[in-house]
Amino acid sequence: MTRPLRIGVQLQPQHADYSTIRDAVRRAEDLGADVIFNWDHFYPLYGEPDGKHFEAWTMQAAWAEQTSRAEIGCLVTCNSYRNPELLADMARTVDHISGGRLVFGIGSGWFERDYDEYGYEFGTAGGRLDALAEALPRIEKRWAALNPAPTRKIPVLIGGGGEKKTLKLVAKHADIWHSFSDVETLRHKRDVLAGHCADIGRDPSEIEISTAATDVEGAKALRDAGAELITYGVGGPDYDLKPLEQLLAWRDTLD
């Protein structure tokens, strides 16, 4: 399956007033971003650790109303923070608000401060992955039961690079696989993913390969390694979208 390259932006909801985030969403869509992501945390991941920060899913509902063309999503939702059935219902609702533009990004979680401050059990990495494996079929089952149903088959993006558990979940459940990989790592993990797909009889080309880049040169190398969705990440307070503009201009030169 051959796909045109897509360019996304992750507007990290930290160190900014919401009015500034709203403006960054407008600018990103006007520039032509294919997907506009946030992230699912409760505190900044870098810079002032107690700086300004906003919650992801309520923000996505606002983005669904604000935007009209770009897909929207979390890069990625933490499975630990919400009951799977509730999360499925939230996603279905944002899917309808957006007119079918939601990308359902999900991962097992890793930022211990979020867990500690909000009263979730952090546990172990393996335990969190096992919980994700248990949640994904529940989410899919709830989508099938909801009235009204989702507007489309909501594309599932799974984030992470673990070869034994995460990539096995990607092979079984994901439409998009996202990792923060360099070129060599991306090539290797694509081969691992292809092996997991072979084990269950799935064509690996059905899964869109997603990663991150900060400039055109890096994006070119990742595209040559198989990346099909490349996302530029930026935080507040100012949301400099010049690198996004350059990535989009490069995208538009491609066949």
Image (cartoon, rainbow, N blue to C red):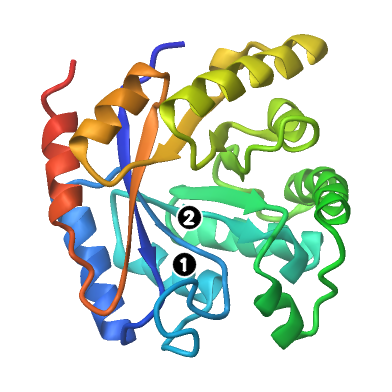
Can you give x and y, in whole percent of width and height, for residue 146 in the image? 74, 54
Find residue 66 and report its image quarter.
Answer: bottom left
Q: Where is residue 243 drawn, in percent x and y?
A: 17, 50
For the C terminus, the image quarter is top left
Drawn side of residue 149 relative to residue 157, left or right: right
Q: Residue at x 35, y 45 (%)?
A: 231
- Give above or below for 186 relative to 29: above
Viewer-closest of 156 and 145:
156
As rendered, which of 12 and 112 lies closer to the eye?
112
Which label is found at residue 29? none
Asked whether disc 1 touches disc 2, contact meaning CB atoms under 8 Å apart, the reply is: yes
Residue 22 falls in image quadrant = bottom left
Q: Is residue 170 above or below residue 82?
A: above
Residue 8 at what x, y percent from top left?
A: 33, 46
Left/right of residue 7 with respect to residue 205 in the rendered view? left
What's the residue at 19%, 36% (across, down)?
Answer: 216
How many numbered callouts? 2
Earlier-in-chain disc, 1 versus 2: 1
Label 1, residues with CA under 10 Å away: few <14, some 14-19, many ≥20: many
Above/below status of 201 relative to 28: above
* Rendered location of residue 109, percent (x, y): 69, 60
Left or right: 59 as drawn, with respect to 171: left
Residue type at tag 1? Gln
Secondary element at tag 1: helix
- Residue under label 2: 73
Q: Amino acid at mark 2?
A: Gly
Mark 2 lies on a secondary structure that is strand
Q: Which mark is residue 60?
A: 1
